[in-house]
Amino acid sequence: MGNVSSLGHGCGAAARSLRLIFPDEETGIAYWSTREWKKWAVHVVAGPAKKPSYKRTAYVRARTREAAIAVAKRDLYPPAPRSARFDARLAGPHELGCVPTAAYPRRDETAARSPASSSFSSGARR
C-alpha cells in the first residue's frame, strides 16, 4: 500500500514518528525532487486530535517545508485559530487535478496513416 517514512527532528528513535507514504505522495516526492520550487499541501488543524473543530488544506508554492508553512500562515483567509497545527507535505498529482491519459501515438504511426483513414474527415456533414 505505501512505504513507511520516519519524520521528526530528534536524535533518538522516540523523537521520530512513523507514517505511511501512499502511492500518490510517493509519485509527488519523486516528481518534485528535481525542481527548485515545489507545490506543497499544508494541512491546518485546530482542536482535539480525534475531533478537530477546524480543518483546512492550503496548496502553496515554496522551496522548503518551513517556507510553505509560513506562506500558508500568511495567506490563509480567514486566518486559522491561534491554536492551529500546521503540517506540510509535497502535493501529489491526483491532488492537483492530473489525470492519467493514453500515450500519444508514435510519429512513425501517424506518418503511415493516410488522410482517408483518419477519424477526422475534411468534408464534415452539416
Image (cartoon, rainbow, N blue to C red):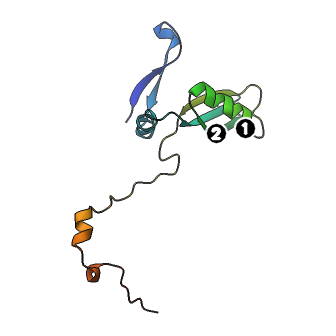
Counting residues from the start of the chain, the first of labels 1 and 2 encountered is 2
* Occupied quadrant, residue 43: top right
Q: Which residue is mark 2?
A: 58
The answer to whether residue 98 is above or below residue 73 is: below
Residue found at x 41% / y 88%: 124
Q: Amino acid at mark 2?
A: Ala
Q: Are marks 1 and 2 in contact (CB under 8 Å)?
A: yes
> Most extreme residue toward the bottom, as rendered?
126
Say what secondary structure mark 2 lies in: strand
Visible residue check, residue 9: yes
Residue found at x 41% / y 26%: 4
Q: Amino acid at mark 1?
A: Leu
Q: Nearer the viewer, residue 51 or 99?
A: 99
Q: Position of residue 75 (x, y in %)?
A: 72, 37
The answer to whether residue 108 is above or below residue 64 is: below
**Tag shown at residue 76:** 1
**Tag shown at residue 101:** none
Q: Position of residue 119 (x, y in %)?
A: 33, 78
Q: Is residue 52 left or right of residue 107?
A: right
> Most extreme residue toward the top, as rendered?
12
The answer to whether residue 93 is above or below residue 100 is: above
Q: Position of residue 27 (x, y in %)?
A: 41, 39
Quadrant location of the N terminus?
A: top left
